[in-house]
Amino acid sequence: MLKKTELITNNDGSIFHLNLLPGDISNNIIIVGDPGRVDMLASLMQDIRVRKENREFHTVTGSFENSEITVISSGIGTDNIDILVNELDALVNIDLNTGIIKEDLISLTFVRLGTSGGLRTDVPAGSCVLTETAIGFDGLLHFYEGYDWILDTGLSDTLAEFLEWPDTLSYPYAVNANKELLELFQNEDFKKGITISAPGFYAPQGRRLRLETFDNEINKKLSEFSYRGRTISNYEMESSAIYGLSALLGHKALTICLVIGNRVTGEFVHDYKPLMSDLALKVFKRL
């Protein structure tokens, strides 16, 4: 039995941060970063039965072509994903009243629909990247026991050596997408590649405003990196935690990101909402 300080609930019995009850979610969950994107995706759905929000976590559950889907916003960063995935798992796999972990565990399906920055000229703005492997520069997974077996250590070790990764930073970790979900979307016109999940938007992604970065050539190096014929396609800020925590907890996870800017060419798509809506429709139909 978990202590009340481990599994925190609100006065109405809902899980602490998400403000959701166990019956509020579907087993198919779309994760978006921007809370405003939840309403945009909800406009594509029918029969919305749940609409709740707390802080940056906005949730709708409804139907699309006779299948139930939940759309929830995470906000930005792997720290928010730590809250999101653990609390979604708790909703289906822990009795919130007693704090007892259930014997028959449920596997959820997470598909992140996000925006990202392309790191190569062959990943132009407006394209969509299906993340085969997420590499975390964030360090979140190192706080959990038993993660070694889910990692692609060959990839992360090769990248760390290539980048001459400093000991002062968390060691990169690589986690592969769920194979079943990869196959589900293999016929779509998506680019496939490795995605870097950065712990920040500016220096961690090679941006310089008034402060210098630890490596002014890191984006160039990332664009040139290759591992067994695979290349790094894009930057974003959540997928390493989604992939890592999902694998540890027995859930399925996949990220598909719209590239709204290319860091090599400087191309940027300002009005990307129609493209995101088109991407969401493709994902809804597959799920």
Image (cartoon, helix red, strand yellow):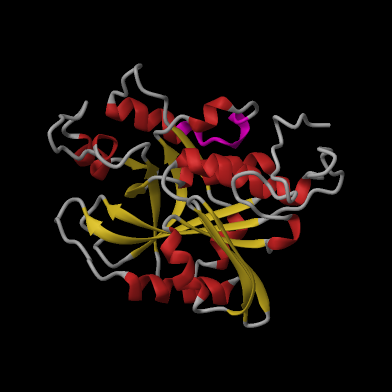
Judge by depth and name the residue closer to the eye, 107 or 39.
39
The answer to whether residue 178 is left or right of residue 115 is right
The answer to whether residue 25 is left or right of residue 259 is right
Q: Quadrant of the N terminus?
A: top right
Number of labels in the image equals: 0
Residue 126: quarter of image = bottom left
Q: Quadrant of the C terminus?
A: bottom right
The answer to whether residue 107 is left or right of residue 124 is right
Query: Going by the picture, which residue comes out furthest to the front?
Result: 11
User: Is residue 164 highlighted in magenta?
Assistant: no
Q: Which residues are magenta?
A: 147-154
Instruction: Identify the residue at horizontal 41%, vertical 47% (top origin).
Output: 76
Locate residue 151, reporting x and y percent.
54, 35
Locate residue 3, reporting x and y percent.
77, 29
Locate residue 285, reporting x and y percent.
56, 77
Above or below, comparing residue 22 to residue 160 in the picture:
below
